[in-house]
Image (cartoon, grey):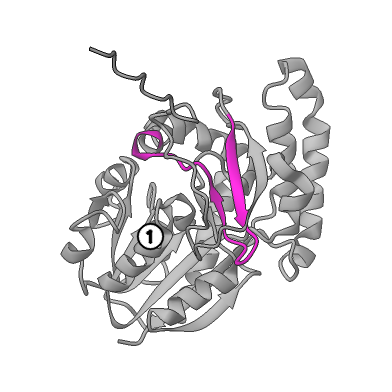
Amino acid sequence: MQPSPPVPRPTQPSDPFQEPRRADCPWCSSPRLRTRLRAPDPLRHRPGTFVLDECRDCAHTFQNPRLAAEGLAFYHRDFYERHLEEFTARVLPDRAARRRHRAAAHKLSLLPDPESWLDVGTGHARFPEAAKEYFPYTSFDGLDPTARVEQALLRGRIEEAHRGYLSTPGTAARLRLRYDVVSMFHHLEHAPDPRAELRAALTALRPGGHLVVEVTDPRCLFAAALGRWWLPYGQPRHLHLMPLANLRAELESQGCTVLVTDRASPHVPHDLTAAVCLAVATAPPLLRAAAAPLRALAAALDHTLAPLSRHTRLSNAYRIVARKDH
């Protein structure tokens, strides 16, 4: 009896935290890809390198290979979230973050007074907490893939907490036609399938309701200038970075009318400051202390450039407000 032939080894080592590398764009299916970034985990400094590819046809940028469900759960653990927030606090203090949430709510106060609002990717529900000042009669619910949403419920910042993604099987059906507004502030970057999240968000909206989407702008010039030190690349947690034109076209194809596109308000002036912090994060304490004047200079430049950045391609984010017509 002849021995069985050996089983061929895979051409790539298997990694339970990552899916197989794909050869086409997840947005438009084009095979014309280029590698935009190779970077390690800049916050926790775990072993390994993460790759962002960009589609040469539609400019969609995506993690390739993408984190699998196990990898997403690992990087979304509460400890990681706390570490991320501690780092972010050095770049964007709590007071500034609260001002940003209040400014976003103020901008959206022109919407017809909603009865119910779902904030997707709500985290600790800081936005619903701030928005209640402008929408005192609105019932705010929150959805998030981490345990933070349940903590937000205990703190009274939201009235209902939902764990997971909108596109989790059964979630969209359970929330069908319940809301007048659905907001997604920097959520789609983390979603394994952003198109499915958008469809699920529209399922949760009543006809005539409004969808608010704010995301990182991959066409920001700081991305090219700073490379791996550009904080909004967000590796390994950011799976997708979508150009405004792609997101707008997708919403219109789903029967929405885009009412607002805003690059100015969502811009956060922290690109240079964050780059300095990331660059010295692994340096010895003495060197990190010596970098304090450089960090202060970077912060001053960020805020000096902000009026220009908000109205040019230096803006690092954009916001779309769309109405569900049917």
**Residue 305 image offset from top left, x and y in percent:** 80, 59
The foreground one among 11 and 127 is 11
From this view, report whether residue 8 is shown above or below residue 321: above
Q: Nearer the viewer, residue 237 or 13?
A: 13
Tell me which residue sits at (26%, 70%) in the image: 204
**Residue designated by label 1:** 128
Can see residue 109?
A: no
Left or right relative to 213: residue 196:
left
| Residue located 59% across and 31% down the image | 49
Screen quadrant of the N terminus:
top left
Q: Amino acid at mark 1?
A: Pro
Query: Magenta part of the protein: which range?
Result: 49-71
Residue visible at 24% across and 52% down in the picture: 161
- Which residue shows up at 51% across the image and 77% down it? 249
User: Does the magenta segment cover residue 302?
Assistant: no
Q: Secondary structure at mark 1?
A: helix
